[in-house]
């Protein structure tokens, strides 16, 4: 797509129509990613058993930690690419592709090797029991050894969306899903490879996706593509990438810490059955949660481009539409948890005790899930404009600042129910604080202080967009 067409589209066309055009493919792509995990869990639940589902839950924090380092690069490069496209700096925008590839490969090797060496102690620390340790180890080894594929896939995917190729990114997710759907039953059931087979099915899907995206960036007519001059890391740009990517890094890092505490609390108060129940609940909530992430990914290039092009009203429009749509998406999760929890749980298992524990937990944990959507959108808004500090703070609110203390205290008084009820309380608190920061930031933009005005109290710098 020629540069002028891309600029006119993001800077001129209706924000509502652009948000739909960019977000729908991204949402489909992220829903497919979530459904990949759902489908994999269904095969594991029915093909291997409830202990295997508990093992899957134990691997969540390991995967989240790997994803944290992956998104530190991927989101930072994508946001910078959008901003520089808006400013017309094609050299820096295109260089983000080279930075993404080099940094993702470096991170995947360093952290993949580290996790491989210390995998069993890590899994035990993260809540594995004597029974679930072996299947958790079996599942993680292929994913760790071939981590560069997953890192490259995510890095390419974010840049594809950031440059306006939302449909290409959607096809990527569909290809990944095809690998899981086709190869999971083959590897798990026909070949009898168990948990390793489930992991290998995901890797096959990642290989399809990386091949597709690499071809996309090789095309000579692409807006951002492989070319000479993009393979040199510039430390000033690396620092900007890390600063902007710190928000999604903290989201996944905090999720890792929280899930460790959560798994250990579940193991203490409900055993492997409760850990397996959380695995089911997490997969269900992931569908709605990843939909909002997809919405944010569609919104990100619009905000980044128009912020770089100095069109604040268009930025505000994208924010408003994003908040409305994000709230509507997570409202469906709350309604499903309240109205048909057992039906949803039985998608994964027909094991009676596991169904009972999962249904009860889903009904409680999903009660205020509606609050998650607008909080994700607010965080994406700050991140898209390069406001790294406040985006990072928003990222930590729900999990570390709100949820973690609740997980440490409430189970002491209410047992397993104290674990479940911690989530909805944290959802409400997180959204409340995020909304306050959004209001303060918008107010600071609307009422800038004139230097020397004694009647005006300037807002903190981290609340106001500024040149990077």
Image (tube, rainbow, N blue to C red):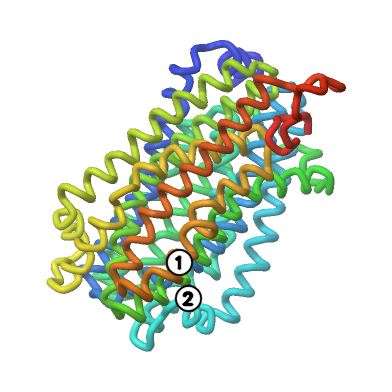
Q: Is mark 1 on a helix, strand or loop?
A: helix
Q: Are marks 2 and 1 in contact (CB under 8 Å)?
A: yes
Report the residue that reaches farthest toward the bottom.
130
How many discs mark residues in the rendered view?
2
Q: Position of residue 457 (x, y in %)?
A: 75, 29
Instruction: Classify 302 as above or below 94.
Output: above
Instruction: Locate the N terminus by quadrant.
Output: top right
The residue positioned 16% from the left and 74% from the top of the image is 353
Answer left or right for 46 relative to 213. Answer: left
- Label whose residue precedes the other's in the sequence (2 or 1): 2
The residue positioned 70% from the left and 30% from the top of the image is 465
Residue to which mark 2 is pinned: 126
Residue to which mark 1 is pinned: 259
Report the residue that reaches farthest toward the right.
452
Instruction: Classify 131 as above or below 461.
Output: below
- Image quadrant assignment for residue 273: bottom left
Q: Where is residue 54 in the image (x, y as percent from the top left)?
A: 32, 73
Residue 33 is at least partly visible in this image = yes
Residue 178 is at least partly visible in this image = no
Answer left or right for 311 relative to 397. Answer: right
Instruction: Locate the C terminus by quadrant.
Output: top right
Q: What element carries label 2?
A: loop
Answer left or right for 361 relative to 17. Answer: left
The residue positioned 47% from the left and 82% from the top of the image is 124
Q: Which of 169 and 267 is in front in this view?
A: 267
Q: Where is residue 142 in the image (x, y as percent from the top left)?
A: 48, 70
- Mark 2 surroundings within 10 Å by alpha-carbon count, few (fewer than 14), some (14 through 19), many (20 or more): many
Could you tell me how far apart the alpha carbons at marks 2 and 1 are, in whole angstroms? 8 Å
Q: Position of residue 14 (x, y in %)?
A: 49, 12
């Amino acid at each position: 797509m020629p540069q002028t067409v891309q600029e006119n589209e993001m800077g001129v066309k209706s924000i509502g129509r652009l948000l739909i055009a960019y977000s729908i493919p991204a949402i489909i792509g992220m829903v497919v990613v979530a459904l990949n995990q759902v489908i994999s869990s269904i095969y594991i639940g029915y093909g291997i058993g409830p202990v295997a589902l508990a093992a899957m839950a134990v691997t969540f924090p390991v995967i989240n930690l790997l994803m944290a380092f992956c998104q530190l690069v991927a989101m930072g490069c994508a946001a910078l690419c959008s901003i520089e496209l808006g400013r017309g700096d094609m050299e820096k925008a295109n260089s983000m592709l080279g930075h993404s590839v080099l940094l993702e490969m470096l991170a995947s090797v360093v952290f993949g090797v580290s996790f491989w060496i210390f995998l069993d102690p890590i899994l035990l620390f993260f809540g594995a029991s004597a029974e679930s340790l072996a299947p958790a180890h079996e599942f993680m080894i292929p994913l760790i050894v071939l981590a560069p594929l997953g890192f490259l896939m995510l890095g390419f995917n974010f840049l594809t969306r950031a440059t306006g190729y939302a449909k290409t990114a959607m096809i990527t997710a569909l290809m990944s899903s095809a690998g899981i759907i086709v190869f999971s039953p083959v590897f798990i059931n026909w070949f009898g490879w168990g948990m390793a087979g489930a992991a290998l099915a995901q890797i096959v899907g990642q290989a399809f996706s990386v091949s597709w995206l690499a071809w996309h960036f090789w095309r000579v007519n692409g807006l951002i593509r492989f070319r000479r001059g993009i393979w040199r890391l510039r430390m000033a740009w690396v620092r900007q990438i890390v600063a902007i990517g710190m928000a999604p890094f903290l989201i996944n890092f905090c999720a890792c810490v929280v899930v460790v505490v959560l798994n250990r609390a579940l193991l203490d108060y409900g055993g492997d059955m409760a850990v397996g129940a959380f695995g089911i609940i997490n997969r269900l909530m992931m569908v709605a949660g990843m939909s909002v992430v997809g919405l944010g990914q569609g919104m990100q290039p619009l905000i980044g481009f128009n912020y770089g092009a100095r069109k604040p009203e268009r930025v505000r429009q994208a924010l408003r539409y994003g908040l409305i749509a994000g709230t509507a998406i997570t409202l469906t999760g709350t309604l499903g948890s309240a109205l048909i929890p057992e039906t949803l749980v039985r998608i994964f298992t027909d094991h009676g005790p596991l169904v009972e524990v999962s249904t009860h937990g889903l009904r409680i944990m999903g009660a205020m899930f509606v609050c998650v959507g607008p909080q994700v959108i607010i965080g994406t808004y700050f991140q898209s404009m390069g406001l790294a500090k406040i985006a990072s703070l928003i990222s930590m609110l729900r999990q570390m600042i709100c949820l973690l203390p609740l997980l440490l205290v409430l189970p002491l008084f209410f047992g397993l129910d104290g674990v479940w009820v911690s989530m909805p309380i944290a959802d409400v608190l997180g959204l409340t604080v995020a909304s306050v920061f959004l209001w303060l930031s918008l107010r600071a933009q609307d009422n800038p202080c004139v230097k020397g005005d004694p009647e005006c109290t300037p807002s903190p710098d981290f609340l106001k967009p500024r040149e990077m």
